[in-house]
Image (cartoon, rainbow, N blue to C red):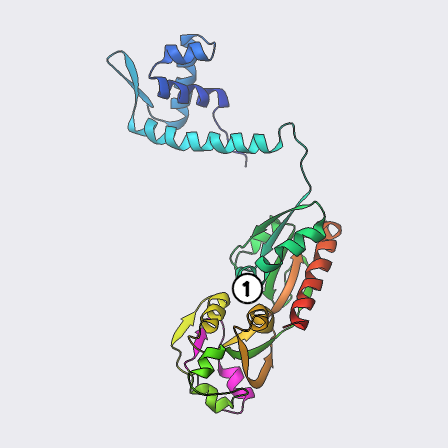
Amino acid sequence: MLKRYPSIQSMQAFLLAARLGSFSSAARQLSLTHSAISQQIRTLEEFVGQPLFVRESGRVVLTDAGVLFANQLADGFEQIDRALSSVKERPVKQSITLDVDPELAQSWLVARLAALLGALSGTSLTVLSTPRHDRSAFERVDIALRYGYGEWDGFENTLICGDRLTAVGSPSLLEERGLTVPLTPEQLLELPLLGYTKRSWIPWLAAAGLPEVEPDAVAVFDNAAGLIAAASAGVGAGLARGLLAADAQRNGNLIELTQVEIPTHYNLYAVWPREKAERVTPLIDVIRDLVAKTVSTR
């Protein structure tokens, strides 16, 4: 259902009268009569259901409701001005809106933005990072990069990257303890461990042939990028996806600590509305190529 709003003219008259403290002065600046301004203000007050001005010593003064409305309304007009100036009498570049999983945006995308923009050849890019649970974002963007199982009803999707989990840590973490890689699984469990709220150590322990009891962690993160940063700083050892840890490994800030690895089932997909397939296909090809190069050179 469409909302009904007061006229733009009445709101402009209100803001001008609020700034000048006079209906007559506002009328002169707008080339209107005093009665016309008064009528517009009355219409606005009827809409909001309470007075916006009171008269004091020959001036009009904002009520508390008027002050609140003026402050909010001024911000709204600034947004309208920005929206109009962004398109008025200027060519509008083709643009693509990309929604990226927050962890992927921090750990992988930023370092590849230049390559991504270069491949888009003149198309501007708007990058969002909406929460994982907000699937309504798919309707507001051209394409999303999300981790999942490939089940997004009503939208097209394609797998971008399968992955693997390994235990990683910094060279300094090992040097402090006189250790060299590869560690045995038992040696790794003697290190300070980093936890992740969305992932348990138990599948890794099972793959290593160790008792499946969740180990204590010195720190627990709700963001894999934060865990990787902490591991790179030598805080402890943690489980990380190959794609997200690839740059830190290539830079020498992280190394794989054991030969134990497990495949991931919750993987990276591109998701897009069906009607935008032609628009986003070139971008998907570029992203898949950048991901493949990342994994192959880590």
Query: Residue 90 location in percent, x, y?
Result: 65, 30
Which residue is located at x 50 percent, y 89 percent?
185
Query: Residue 152 location in percent, x, y?
Result: 63, 61
Task: Provide the secondary structure element on which disc 1 rests.
Answer: helix
Highlighted magenta segment, given as a residue range: 192-213
Query: Residue 36 location in percent, x, y?
Result: 44, 11
Query: Residue 96 location in percent, x, y?
Result: 65, 47
Residue found at the far right of this picture:
278
Up the image or down, 257 lies above or below 113; here it is: below
Which residue is located at x 47 percent, y 9 percent?
31
The residue lying toward the viewer, choosing from 270 and 176, is 176
Q: Quadrant of the C terminus?
A: bottom right
Compared across the picture, whether 132 is left or right of 58 comes to: right
| Pointer 1 residue | 107
| Residue type, mark 1 in image | Ser
Which residue is located at x 33 percent, y 17 percent?
21
Please indicate, yes or no, whether residue 154 appears anywhere in the rendered image: no
The residue lying toward the viewer, choosing from 142 and 246, is 246
Compared across the picture, whether 67 is left or right of 239 comes to: left
Compared across the picture, whether 228 is left or right of 127 comes to: left
Examine the structure image and report whether residue 189 is included in the region drawn in magenta.
Answer: no
Compared across the picture, whether 149 is left or right of 34 comes to: right
Label 1: few (<14), some (14–19) or many (≥20) C-alpha neighbours in 10 Å: many
The residue lying toward the viewer, choosing from 237 and 173, is 173
Q: Quadrant of the N terminus?
A: top right
Give the number of marks.
Answer: 1
Examine the structure image and report whether residue 204 is included in the region drawn in magenta.
Answer: yes
Please indicate, yes or no, whether residue 112 appears anywhere in the rendered image: yes
Residue found at the far left of this picture:
57
> Residue 175 appears in which quarter of the rendering?
bottom left
Up the image or down, 215 lies above or below 27; here it is: below
Which residue is located at x 68 percent, y 60 percent?
287
